[in-house]
């Protein structure tokens, strides 16, 4: 197998994780629809998006893992050769990037839902320390997203740099 094939397997794992994430998010949507007087509140719509968007992304990832892995790793020869150290390291970097992307994706949805709930709430009772803490959490989530996407899409460059530095 080539590095592209391993990355395609990791992409399919991400698709499975996203479906599991959506199932976990189903609880919020059900509780909002059961206990809400209005059915289309902003919180309900965002909770529904919290289910639908990951499932749609999972479908795309499941159907096109080879296309995405070729975009990430790049085109390679059709002949399967043993993995080089650069190939192994690139696949590991993509796996770490996808793992961190999964958790930062969940955190990003959390902050979207949190901000939606704050828009509908009375803000006079919120502690300034809590606001600062939440703002820092949002920044950390943004940095996690950027770093995970960098690991995914610049894996070959980072792998070459790590090998060059380690020699």
Image (spheres, rainbow, N blue to C red):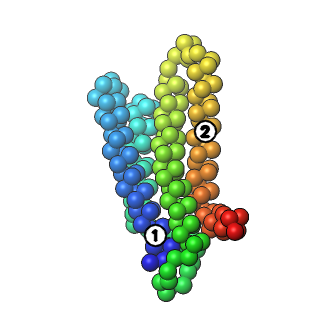
Instruction: List the residue tagged with mark 2.
Output: 140
Residue depicted at x 28% and y 29%: 34
Residue marked by disc 1: 6
Question: Does 51 sit above or below residue 2?
Answer: above
| Camera-side residue of 43 and 40 | 43
**Mark 2 falls on what kind of element?**
helix
Could you say which quadrant of the image residue 76 lies in? bottom right
Q: Name which residue lies at 52% across and 35% down.
A: 111
Q: Please report whichever mark, 2 or 1, sits nearer to the chain's N-terminal start.
A: 1
Task: Give the CA separation, mark 2 to mark 1.
Answer: 29 Å
Q: How crowded is mark 2: few (under 14 residues within 10 Å), some or many (20 or more)?
A: some
Residue at 36% x, 51% y is 19
Q: In this view, does 18 lie above or below 115?
A: below
Residue 159, x across and y down, in percent: 63, 66
How many marks can you see?
A: 2
At which x and y percent is residue 125?
Answer: 54, 12
Q: Position of residue 49 (x, y in %)?
A: 42, 43
Mark 2 vs mark 1, foreground winner is 1
Res. 157 visible in picture: no
Q: In this view, does 117 lie to the left or right of 31?
A: right
**Crowdedness of circle 1 by 10 Å Cα count: few (<14), some, many (20+)?**
some
Q: Which of 163 and 72 is in front in this view?
A: 163
Quadrant of the rendered image containing residue 42: top left
């Amino acid at each position: 197998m080539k590095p592209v094939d391993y990355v395609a397997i990791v992409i399919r794992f991400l698709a499975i994780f996203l479906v599991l994430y959506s199932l976990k998010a189903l609880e919020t949507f059900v509780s909002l629809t059961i206990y809400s007087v209005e059915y289309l509140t902003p919180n309900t719509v965002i909770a529904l998006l919290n289910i639908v968007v990951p499932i749609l992304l999972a479908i795309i990832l499941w159907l096109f893992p080879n296309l995405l892995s070729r975009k990430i790793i790049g085109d390679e020869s059709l002949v399967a050769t043993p993995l080089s150290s650069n190939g192994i390291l690139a696949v590991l970097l993509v796996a770490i990037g996808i793992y961190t992307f999964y958790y930062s994706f969940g955190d990003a949805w959390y902050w979207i839902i949190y901000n939606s709930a704050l828009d509908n709430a009375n803000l006079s009772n919120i502690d300034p320390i809590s606001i600062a803490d939440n703002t820092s959490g949002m920044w950390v989530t943004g940095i996690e997203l950027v770093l995970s996407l960098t690991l995914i899409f610049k894996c070959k460059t980072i792998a070459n740099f790590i090998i060059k530095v380690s020699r």
